[in-house]
Image (cartoon, rainbow, N blue to C red):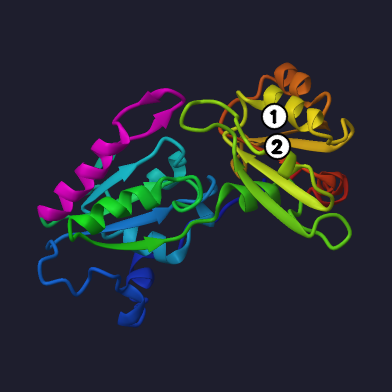
Amino acid sequence: MSERQPPPSAKGARNARLPTRYRRNAVTDNPNSSAGEVFLIGAGPGDPELLTLKAWRILNTAEVVLFDRLVSPEILALIPEQAETIHVGKRRSQHVLPQAQINQRLVELAQAGKRVVRLKGGDPFIFGRGGEELETLARAGVRFQVIPGITAASGCAAYAGIPLTHRDYAQSVRFVTGHLKNNTCDLPWADFVQNNQTLVFYMGLVGLPVIARSLMDHGMSPAMPVALISKGTTPEQQVVVSDLEHIAARVAESGVGAPTLIIIGQVVELRSKLDWVG
């Protein structure tokens, strides 16, 4: 990993002002809206230098920050000392706060006049439940803004040297959740077995044997290249590459842990030439 430089000075970031029209949302002009405001921020996949300038600027003005477990320690270190921090992270079947309580907490803090940052790993609108939280805020008349983040698919793939699309190998890419609300992988497997397509599974470490077996059962070649990326974009990044038939065994042998991202497709073969992280 190359040495990372610190973000620009707080003074410079705070002096960067966007036109007002870019800082409004559907409830901003509601006279019954709360005095506070919620900023839904995507923190990216881990590397603090992948945090957007807007996200970093707003984070520096936060009074309260509610953060998930996937937000990296380096990004948490950027939270102002005077801000209250609340951990609301989730692990598989282990929630510090149920989602409904997180939603309500955001409403209560904003209605108390607080400037609230809801900080999520990756992008809040890609398997991040950001839409659910904003629905609750909108019903309550709470002002909010959304600052997108670099999702794990693009960040981890880039740091692993795997382009998600390529004119010779993949003209489409599909993002899939590795587990559903009932903790199963009950997915439209036949739809996933397509030529010239890259599949990206989020949260698929536990379900990897089922994913691999289901894809092969529906016609995908056992020789299809697969990469599993653990802790992508961080100094602890590990990449396990194999074929569909053997990837589950290789990952089990490696002992890698969550968070992980799984990439399936011919583009994985390009890693041997394009891996720039090492």
Answer yes or no: is residue 78 visible. Answer: no
Answer yes or no: is residue 182 visible. Answer: yes
User: Is 103 in the magenta?
Assistant: yes
Residue corresponding to mark 1: 211
Report which quarter residue 234 is drawn in: top right
Element assignment for label 1: helix
How far apart in space, not on screen, are marks 2 and 1 (Cα)? 9 Å
Determine the residue positioned at 29% across, 31% down.
Answer: 97
Please report whichever mark, 2 or 1, sits nearer to the chain's N-terminal start.
2
Element assignment for label 2: helix
Residue corresponding to mark 2: 189
Report which quarter residue 86 is drawn in: top left
Contact between marks 2 and 1 (CB within 8 A): the answer is: no
Residue type at mark 2? Answer: Trp
User: Is 209 in the magenta?
Assistant: no
Image height of 265 relative to 8, above or below: above
Q: Nearer the viewer, mark 2 or mark 1?
A: 2
- Residue 216, percent from left and from top: 81, 30
- Residue 133, percent from left and from top: 32, 49
Image height of 150 relative to 249, above or below: below
Residue stretch rendered in magenta on the structure:
87-112
68 lies left or right of 232: left
- Residue 178, percent from left and from top: 59, 34
Residue type at mark 1? Answer: Ile
Please state which of residues 34 and 48 is positioned toward the viewer in this rendering. Answer: 34
- Residue 62, percent from left and from top: 25, 56
Q: Which mark is residue 132?
A: none
Determine the residue positioned at 83% across, 36% down.
Answer: 220
Determine the residue positioned at 32% across, 64% down.
Answer: 145
